């Protein structure tokens, strides 16, 4: 038997998803999209819908990352590399957009 | 095991310091970098989402049902891509090729959809020159489409390698690069779908 | 289990590789050769950027100068900045990283040798592309930070700023590819026992630099794409009339631009942190502190970008926040200064040329760092923005800092690259002439700036009280030029006269000196087993019972040179490949297509695609191709 190499489908000794899992995940994602559309078309108050849509997007993001990109089975190093980029991007761009809001003078009345 | 173990550094990867594949560290670092790339583009879009320059607004322009269908296609392609990788990891080369071909095909459907959408928008007078909104829309979704296109080319490359016998089971981590990249492209679409299409057009329905 | 063995057959395609001659340099994937290519190219660009600087200084030597026209002046200062930043300091750092990092961590090559070659060729073609603008209708003339709306087609209609957006885009691709490569190399290719906290400082700082590049390059890429779409396709990103916001350019540019500052200085800090312990005969004082200070600078470098934009009117909240963060980033930088001082304190100092440059680095960098802190205070920054005070500040950190640090590295590792030393006497002359010239040029700029002389004016009237400092600066600039000639003379003379370098000419502490000078293609016959920080030193010295380190004769320095030749068998390195060059050539072709002749875009993309497909499908070694 050959020695362990990557490509062995045990990710970091934490197993791996099976065909069934992948299909279920895809179904779950489709359900979330359907929910998004339902909320989008049926619910009225924007203040409620925007956070809901944000949460749905985050759920889809999380599911794809942890299953289809199998981060939950794989080495922490990968997770950290990806998260460092993601967290950095979210923080600097939130700060940037916030500065645009702060720098805009209040409309004169 | 196989007599073919190329004696070059990349083949000795089981001697790496972390025990992980060079390729996979590289792709995850690159995807981290891509977060900043799409972060810049998405922030530009958010900044300009109301700058219509007298042209059409987002709500007047986008076709949500069409975009929703495209979203399903992309989710499906992520599944086929993941299944393809699983097949290769288990040594089922035929299934691998079939899933990868299916993924590339779904990707092409997505690109076809985008081409259709862009043409339609141009005909309606919503072009890259119309307004900051339009510029940021086309550049953001265009770069996403570009990423999908590169992904399709890489999937075809995998297919070619597999058919030439250059993608043995133990090199599945090479195929994994493409599959991870493909998953990321899907993730970006998740954000685009919500931020670009859904939120700015709310209340139109 | 199914194995896929390649059947024996004829090579599928021509795989022209060579070990010597010009072609061997084109197809090389050896990190040492690529490092040399980077270094040589960066030095040539250094001369070009230097000539531009001399022209600027000649123009400003006297009031109402007539050496160059106003237009030419705009081009000169823009190209001087772009050249020195993107074509000199960054690639010179990368040159040393390429050559030294794999040796310092005990690796045979970088993780992706062909990607490494690709980075170099893209860098070279990007630089040549940028300079080809002089022949093709005007070079960039909107300043190195290309502020919108000045840089839009309405105000600078020629092709110059389009060359800027496309050229920098290519250089960014090169840097990004290099960054991924070095991150993987340093994380994953270390010799057994080389834990993170045993890594030499230059390797550490290369890792931090690579992460900064990894995350900063995509931001500038987007800014440049937006500029390019504005200029080539008539998009409205920075078109104020259509509702575009020029502040967006500033934010994206400085989101990249401030990490970029640390990208330029951190490799130099790493070099100095390796040089000073060697010539002080002491281990680096506070190794963990200096490592974490480097990481902290890398992190905090992301939270200070808006201090470049205080004068843009961001509002009091943003200005205050960025004042605070900017002042805080001085703390880890100060920690490093004290580490270097603490290393020298009580050491047995040897003032060889690399050490002189390293000390020069510390001193000049402190001056630049202090004037930097004065910018952090918003009211004081309002006074200094766009004056010569800023020019003085960033030359003290980039020339007094980075360039001095890089010269320290060049003198230190020269025997490693070429097998012979650089002459000490001429080297010291080089250092002193450069130090004097540098201070004559840039110190008076502080005063000129506070007197209100704006940067980027092509001339000034004679009654402003600026005449004498400006004249002194020009003299200083000529002295710097003389010092570079001294360096060139040193390189030429030493090549003929200096004896072959000993194995470990500086009594160094890190692994790269375990190999012969220059190292064989595979670096190490046997990958060393690392047991200590400063591994090489511990192989040379052991404490006596009284605790005094004494030289041991146990053959600790046994190197590749002593090893029987047959050990090199069984080490297979990847063969040369022309695919990286091919893929890289496609980029300028595409860029010229965007500028002049759209069908070239298709051709360029086709070349890139062919290059990459060839790259993926070609076997790693020639033997495999049969």
Image (spheres, rainbow, N blue to C red):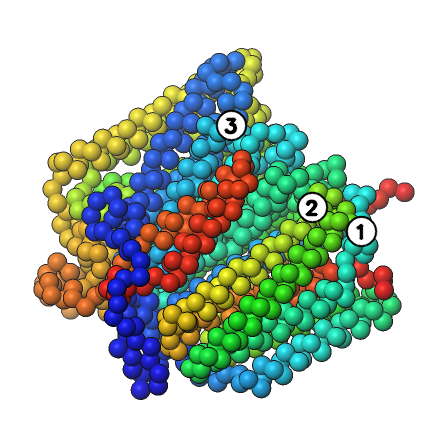
The answer to which quarter of the image holds residue A39 is: bottom right
- Of callouts 1 and 2, the N-terminal one: 1
| Residue C36 position (above or below residue C116) | above
Q: Which residue is mark 3?
A: C138
Q: Which residue is mark 2?
A: B128
What is the crowding at mark 2: few (fewer than 14 residues within 10 Å), some, or many (at least 20)? many
The answer to which quarter of the image holds residue C309 is: top right
Q: Residue at x 41, y 71 (%)?
A: B163
Q: Quadrant of the C terminus of chain C?
A: bottom left
Q: Which mark is residue B57?
A: 1
Chain letter of the residue carrying label 2: B
Q: Residue at x 35, y 86 (%)?
A: C1
Observer able to see residue B45: no
State left or right for residue B23 relative to residue C385: left
Q: At which x and y percent is residue C260?
A: 49, 47
Number of residue marks: 3
The answer to which quarter of the image holds residue A7 is: bottom left
Is label 2 or label 3 in front?
Answer: 2
State left or right for residue C413 relative to residue A93: left
- Whole-number angstrom distance, CA of label 2 to CA of label 3: 27 Å
State the residue in front, C553 or A79.
A79
């Amino acid at each position: 038997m050959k020695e362990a190499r990557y490509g062995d489908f045990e990710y970091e000794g934490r197993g791996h998803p099976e065909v069934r899992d992948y299909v279920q995940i895809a179904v779950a994602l489709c359900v979330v999209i359907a929910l998004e559309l339902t909320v989008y078309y049926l619910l009225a108050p924007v203040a409620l819908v925007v956070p809901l849509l944000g949460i749905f997007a985050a759920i889809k993001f999380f599911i794809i990352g942890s299953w289809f990109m199998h981060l939950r089975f794989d080495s922490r190093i990968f997770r950290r590399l990806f998260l460092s980029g993601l967290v950095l991007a979210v923080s600097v761009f939130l700060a940037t957009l916030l500065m645009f809001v702060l720098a805009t003078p209040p409309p004169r009345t | 095991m196989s007599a073919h173990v190329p004696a070059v550094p990349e083949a000795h990867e089981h001697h790496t310091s972390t025990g992980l594949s060079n390729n996979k560290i590289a792709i995850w670092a690159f995807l981290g970098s891509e977060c900043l790339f799409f972060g810049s583009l998405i922030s530009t879009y958010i900044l300009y989402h109301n700058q219509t320059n007298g042209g059409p607004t987002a709500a007047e322009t986008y076709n949500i049902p069409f975009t929703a269908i495209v979203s399903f296609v992309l989710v499906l392609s992520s599944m086929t891509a993941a299944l393809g990788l699983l097949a290769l990891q288990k040594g089922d080369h035929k299934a691998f090729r079939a899933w990868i071909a299916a993924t590339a095909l779904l990707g092409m459907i997505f690109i076809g959809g985008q081409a259709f959408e862009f043409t339609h928008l141009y005909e309606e007078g919503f072009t890259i020159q119309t307004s900051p909104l339009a510029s940021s829309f086309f550049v953001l979704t265009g770069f996403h489409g570009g990423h999908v296109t590169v992904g399709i080319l890489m999937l075809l490359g995998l297919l070619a390698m597999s058919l030439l016998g250059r993608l043995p089971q133990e090199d599945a981590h090479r195929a994994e690069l493409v599959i991870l990249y493909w998953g990321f492209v899907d993730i970006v679409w998740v954000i685009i779908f919500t931020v670009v299409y859904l939120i700015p057009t709310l209340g139109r329905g | 289990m199914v194995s896929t063995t390649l059947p024996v057959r004829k090579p599928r395609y021509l795989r022209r590789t060579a070990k010597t001659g010009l072609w061997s340099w084109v197809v090389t994937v050896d990190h040492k050769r690529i490092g040399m290519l980077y270094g040589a190219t960066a030095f040539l660009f250094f001369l070009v950027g230097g000539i531009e600087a001399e022209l600027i200084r000649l123009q400003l030597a006297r009031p109402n100068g007539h050496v160059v026209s106003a237009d030419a002046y705009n081009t000169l200062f823009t190209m001087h900045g772009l050249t020195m930043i993107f074509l000199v300091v960054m690639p010179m750092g990368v040159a040393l990283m390429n050559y030294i990092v794999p040796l310092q961590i005990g690796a045979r090559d970088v993780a992706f040798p062909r990607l490494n070659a690709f980075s170099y060729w893209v860098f070279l073609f990007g630089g040549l592309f940028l300079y080809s603008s002089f022949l093709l209708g005007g070079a960039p003339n909107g300043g190195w930070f290309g502020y919108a709306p000045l840089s839009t087609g309405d105000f600078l209609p020629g092709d110059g700023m389009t060359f800027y957006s496309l050229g920098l885009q290519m250089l960014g691709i090169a840097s990004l590819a290099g960054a991924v490569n070095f991150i993987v190399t340093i994380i994953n290719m270390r010799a057994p026992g080389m834990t993170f906290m045993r890594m030499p400082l230059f390797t550490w700082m290369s890792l931090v630099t690579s992460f900064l590049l990894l995350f900063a390059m995509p931001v500038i890429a987007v800014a440049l794409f937006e500029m390019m779409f504005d200029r080539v396709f008539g998009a409205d990103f920075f078109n104020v009339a259509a509702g575009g916001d020029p502040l967006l350019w500033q934010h994206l540019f400085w989101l990249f631009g401030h990490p970029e500052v640390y990208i330029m200085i951190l490799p130099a800090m790493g070099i100095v942190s390796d040089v000073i312990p060697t010539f002080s005969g002491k281990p680096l004082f506070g190794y963990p502190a200096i490592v974490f200070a480097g990481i902290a600078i890398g992190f905090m470098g992301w939270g200070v970008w808006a201090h470049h934009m205080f004068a843009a009117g961001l509002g009091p909240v943003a200005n205050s926040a960025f004042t605070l963060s900017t002042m805080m980033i001085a703390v880890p930088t100060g920690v490093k200064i004290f580490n270097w001082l603490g290393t020298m304190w009580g050491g047995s100092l040897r003032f060889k040329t690399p050490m002189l440059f390293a000390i020069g680095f510390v001193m000049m960098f402190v001056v630049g760092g202090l004037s930097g802190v004065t910018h952090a205070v918003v009211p004081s920054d309002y006074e200094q923005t766009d004056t010569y005070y800023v020019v003085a500040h960033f030359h003290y950190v980039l020339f007094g800092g980075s360039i001095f640090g890089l010269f320290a590295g060049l003198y230190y590792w020269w025997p490693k690259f070429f097998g012979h030393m650089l002459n000490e006497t001429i080297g010291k002359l080089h250092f002193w002439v450069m130090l004097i010239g540098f201070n004559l040029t840039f110190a008076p700029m502080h005063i000129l700036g506070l007197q209100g002389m704006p940067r980027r004016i092509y001339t000034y009237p004679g009654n402003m009280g600026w005449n004498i400092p400006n004249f002194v600066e020009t003299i200083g600039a000529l002295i710097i030029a003389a010092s570079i000639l001294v360096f060139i003379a040193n390189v030429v003379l030493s090549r003929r006269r200096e004896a072959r370098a000993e194995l470990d000419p500086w009594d160094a502490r890190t692994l790269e000196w375990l190999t012969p000078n220059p190292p064989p293609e595979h670096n190490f016959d046997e990958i060393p087993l690392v047991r200590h920080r400063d591994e090489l030193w511990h192989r040379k010295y052991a404490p006596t019972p009284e605790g005094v380190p004494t030289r041991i004769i146990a053959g600790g320095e046994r190197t590749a040179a002593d090893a029987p030749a047959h050990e090199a068998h069984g080490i297979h390195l990847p063969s040369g490949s022309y695919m990286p060059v091919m893929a890289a050539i496609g980029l300028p072709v595409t860029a010229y297509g965007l500028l002049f002749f759209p069908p070239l875009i298709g051709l360029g993309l086709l070349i890139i695609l062919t290059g990459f497909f060839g790259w993926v499908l070609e076997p790693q070694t020639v033997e495999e191709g049969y």
